[in-house]
Amino acid sequence: MYRLITSLLCCFSFNSFATVLSGTDADARLPFWEWRGEKVSIRLVQRLPDQSRAYFMARNFSNAQAELMAQSCVFQTIFKNTASPGQTRVISYDLSDWVVKSAGRKRGLITREAWKKTWKTKNVAQASLIALEWSLLPTKHRYEPGDFNWGMTMYGLPPGTHFDLQLVWYENDLQKKAVIPGVECAPDIHPDPESE
C-alpha cells in the first residue's frame, strides 16, 4: 500500500503543495518513490542489479562492463508533464542539474554523456552503445502538456544506499526545485523470478 507524505515545498515562483508517494510498483514488484506536484510527476522504480546485469550482457557488454552499470544504483524513471493538453505549461529538465545527496556528500547522476566517456576507450561495440543510449532517460528533454517519457537513471551509489534526490526542472522557463527524500538503491539480492 502507498505510504503518503505530504509536504510544503518552496519552488522559486511560489509555494506549492506536493506529494511524495512510495510503495511497491504493481508491474515491477519493486519499491518506488514518486514526486507529484503541479503539472509534473516523477517516479523512480528500483531495478535489481541482476536485472541490469542481464539487460546489459544481453546487449553484448562484457561481464565486467555490465557489472559496473549494475552496481551504479539503477532506477526506471518516468517523467510526465501532467498538464492537460491545450494548457501552456511546457516542462523541461537537464539531468545535469539534479543532485544526489548521500552520507553528507553531493554528486550528479551518471548521464548518457558520462557513459560515453567511460566506454570511449573500452572497445565497446557501437550497437551496444546505441542500446545503452536509448535505454537511459534523455539528459535533456522538453515536454508539452500530456507528454511523458521513461528510461533508466543511474546514481553512482552502491546497492542498498539511501539518498535524497534534488530535482530541478523548468516550467515555461521558470526554474523549480523539489526533493524526493529517502530513496533507496536496490540491494544486490538474487531472488528467483516469479512465475505468472
Image (cartoon, rainbow, N blue to C red):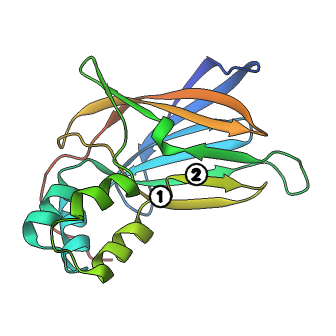
> Residue 82: in sight, yes or no?
yes
Where residue 37 sits in the image (x, y, percent)? 67, 34
| Closest to the observer, 130 or 21 | 130
Element at label 1: loop
Looking at the rendered image, the quarter that the C terminus falls into is bottom left
Q: Position of residue 53 (x, y in %)?
A: 18, 66
Q: Residue at x 74, y 41 (%)?
A: 39
The part of the image, by quadrant, that contains residue 129 is: bottom left
Query: Does the image show residue 2?
Result: no
- Verify CB contact (< 8 Å) between mark 2 and mark 1: yes
Could you tell whether 2 is left or right of 149 in the image? Answer: left
Q: Identify residue type, mark 1.
A: Leu
* N-term-proximal mark, 2 vs 1: 2
129 in relation to 11, above or below: below
In the displayed structure, would residue 90 be above or below residue 70? above
Residue, disc 2: 79
Numbered disc 2: secondary structure? strand
Q: Is residue 169 above or below residue 69?
A: above
What residue is shown at x 38% (from left), y 55% (from top)?
113
Q: Nearer the viewer, mark 2 or mark 1?
A: 1
In the depicted view, which residue is nearer to us: 147 or 27?
A: 147
* Amino acid type for the residue under numbered disc 2: Phe
Q: Which residue is mark 1?
A: 137
